[in-house]
Amino acid sequence: MRTILTIVCTIFAACAFGAEKKSAPKKTSLTETELRAIAKATPNAKDAGTLYSVGMATNNVERRQEYLQASAACLLACGKNEIYSKRIKGKLANAAAFEEKLKDKCKRCSGVGKKDSRCYVCSGKGQCSSCKGSGKTVSMGFDRANGWKACHKCKGSGRCQKCGGGGSTKEKCSTCRGTGKTFQQSVAERVFRDSCNGIANRMVAEAKAKAEAEERDRKIKAAEQGNVDAQLELALCYESGKGVRKDVGEAEERDRKIKAAEQGNVDAQLELALCYESGKGVRKDVGEALKWWRKAAEQGNAEAQCALGLAYHSGNGVAQDQAEAVKWYRKAADQGSFVAQCELGMHYIAGDGVPKNMDEGMRFIRMAAEQNYRKAQSVLGLLYAEVVGDYTNAVKWYRKAADQGWAQAQYELGLCYGKGKGVGVDMHEAAKWYRKAAIQGLAKAQEAIAGCYFVGYGVNENHYEAVKWYHKAAEQGLALSQYILGVCYKDGDGVQADIYKAVQLFHRSAGQGFAEAQYELSRCYLLGLGVERDDEIAVSLCKKAAEQGYAQAQYVFATMCSAKGYMSEAHEWYRKAAIQGHKDAIEALRKNRSN
């Protein structure tokens, strides 16, 4: 009876899978929409049969395997394992790899492959149940000399004989047989959906490629007939690889651009200028780039006019001429170029190539800022803060630029929150904006967030994190960061102590005239820390720091002068340090007066 039922069930399943029916002919193709619909539906034998039929109907071996894999995953996802084994498994190119893909971490052993359970003999303690871990037992007939004898169960080891003292038994998982993975229908369902969507995506890509190839052929035909726009479009296609093999260095692309540019096509002139400027597809040539910028600019193109302005401003490829830069910026600005408006505004602010005019400068910069140009927004915020003294408006424009990711604005906004200018003091917000700017590589912001971590302003105090950011700022040449990092290496604060690295950093900072670094380096030479002792260099460095007004250096230099008998000079440096409130200097002056 059971055999008959099995046969009936198998026949029924085969029909559901898609066995040949006179009333329902097999499908030989599927559209992208149909594949997407199958992927969204619950896996069932009917869809598996459809995928199988389409796969077997195609002559492309690779495509056939795609459809068969989708069909197989669908069958396994809906529990039709027997049909998969009989109908599809033998047709899959790599069935073993496919089946391995359908496995996931065994739920019973959590992927370990072994079942870890508490030893039932010792209740997880790992001790011998007879001697309670002592390894000894007292019984009749014990050794009178020692008063004990070895436990008969553990042979004197004191360990549980079942688990070996570990407290748990590890046996091969019966579900996954120690592999840690088992077949799961949920994984099969995911593979089924991914396979269907993958085939659909491939169909879309092929259709797109076909359309691009047809469009390319049309452009080539039009370009060969002398159509300037088609020549430029075709050059762009070769550059981007759209519908053709991407090959920037291809002579055909360059020739088409040149031909279109020489016929006066502004877009072609711009493209050609960019190519010569960057060396993309041609030999880099700033002069040639400027030639095409000028041709496009003379036809009234704002982008080219702005580019010419930038060239004259920086002296890139032409003699530096701020008046000429202003001339081209103005032409572009009058056409609404926000870059030119911002640059022209900054020329008015600085009086560079044009009479200085703060109002006119702010007017042009505001025009650019109102077009959502983030650099202009940041500059406008800075003008409000430092020129007008209106921090409310400064914060408003800083925020607009900061929200667009402009690092300088993010840093300035952090400063406003840190100092309570235009907003309430909020060190958490300050640290947040410092960090955003620091991540983008702004050195001042890196130094600021390092300081926050060092003292715990707006973030949890973390000297290791502080050292990380001080490193980044120091590498960009900030003298304060170099000095603080040197102190950290000297003291082993947030980093392993290394006096030699400390001295290197003090040298770099002192070389930029940083007084505190000069004083620390003076002490290193005086005491022979990380360098060979040299009193002459020590005195010279200490004097340099003192001359910059560093009170501690003034006091120490006064002491050096006093030790050499230069009492009047010593008195003068004590006085300078005392004016700044240096207690030791004040005490030294008091003693000198009493003497």
Image (spheres, grey):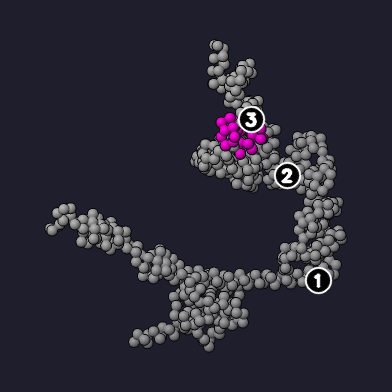
Q: Residue at x 58, y 70 (%)?
A: 198
Residue toward you, 182 or 403: 182
Residue 416 percent across, percent down from the top left: 60, 36
**Secondary structure mostly taken by the magenta-highlighted segment of the chain:** helix
Label 3 to label 1: alpha-carbon separation: 79 Å
Whether 524 is among the magenta residues is yes
Amino acid type, mark 2: Ala
Residue at image point 57% right, 16% down: 589
Residue nearest the viewer, comparing 249 with 477: 477
Q: Is residue 113 above or below residue 132?
A: below
Foreground residue, 354 or 141? Answer: 141
- Looking at the picture, which amino acid does disc 1 mark? Lys
Residue 409, numbered circle: none
Q: Residues within 10 Å of mark 1 (few under 14, many from 20)?
A: some
Image quadrant where residue 566 sits: top right
The mark tally for this picture is: 3
Secondary structure at badge 3 equals helix
Residue 184: which quarter of the image?
bottom left
**Disc number lying in front (3 or 2):** 3
What residue span does the magenta drawing correspond to?
A: 504-533
Secondary structure at numbered mark 1: helix
Provide the residue designation for mark 1: 221
Q: Which residue is mark 2?
A: 368
Q: Report the residue marked by disc 3.
A: 537
Mark 2 lies on a secondary structure that is helix
- Could you say where residue 493 lies in the image, as x and y percent from the top left? 51, 38
